[in-house]
Image: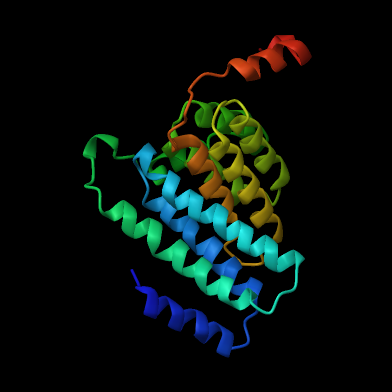
Amino acid sequence: MGGPFEINAVVMGFFKRSAGLLDVGDGVVACFQRYLIDVLEHPSAFPHPTHALDYLNVVQSWIRNFDNTQQVKAVFMGALHERSDPIRSNAIYPFDPSFALESRHAHHAWTDGFAVDRLLPVIQRHVLAQDAPRAGALVDSYLGRTDERRALMDTITYTACHWQNDPHVMRNGASSLEEFHYNQMPRRDDIIRGYAKHQACYIKRAPTHDCYHVFANHFHPTEA
């Protein structure tokens, strides 16, 4: 894990090779997903890293929509904060083996048994069940078998709307949706994988779905 000077040098190297401000930010957003997907396991370990992701989304949105001579500084800040602060903070706490997750790769054979046009409801069920390994495997299977992305993102977002009293759930959804829409990196699908992992593992302030059931009962009584 690089320190501040190493990260600054990497960012400067990209700029020297004519990378744009958004190019660097897009790369940081996409690459940081691997930490969410492959490293984070304890539900309480998500808030700090995903706050950093939300802050980087603010930086990217600012650069996309406004012009300012100081914006290059924000790219360095975003890369430093995203790569260094939350990862170092989480590393302070000892690993708790009782929260170790199965590898999502262990379930790939199982997921491939579903027809691709039947996967979305199954993804929803496993995200709601907070079953991150199977939810991640299902998302992998979907991404690998179709070029469709909108319905998948809608499914994860609709599932996230079941939880209440936690703005972090919706904030992660807003950041993930916007960054996936604009990201130009070849690994942009990792944003979807990270989004699903967050919603299927992050500790929720309230595990109940009372508000969702009020609306579901009103608009779709059979789904409540």
Where, quadrant-wise, is the N terminus in this rendering?
bottom left
Q: Is residue 190 visible?
A: no
Quadrant of residue 72 within the rendered picture:
bottom right
Tell me the colour scheme of the image: rainbow
Above or below for 112 versus 30: above
Above or below for 64 versus 177: below
Q: Residue furthest bottom?
A: 16
Where, quadrant-wise, is the C terminus in this rendering?
top right
Residue placed most toward the observer, 78 or 126: 78
Residue placed most toward the observer, 187 or 159: 159
> Which residue lies at the image location 63% right of the left edge and 58% below the top edge?
58
Residue 212: image location, x then y, percent: 64, 20
Residue 94: image location, x then y, percent: 21, 47
Q: How many marks?
A: 0
> Which residue lies at the image location 39% right of the left edge and 65% below the top edge?
84
> Which residue lies at the image location 52% right of the left edge and 74% below the top edge?
76
Residue placed most toward the observer, 30 or 63: 63
Quadrant of residue 219 within the rendered picture:
top right
Residue placed most toward the observer, 132 or 148: 132
> Which residue lies at the image location 56% right of the left edge and 56% below the top edge?
55
Residue 120: image location, x then y, percent: 63, 34
Quadrant of residue 104 within the rendered picture:
top left
Q: Is residue 203 visible?
A: yes
Above or below for 128 versus 29: above
Residue 32: image location, x then y, percent: 48, 60
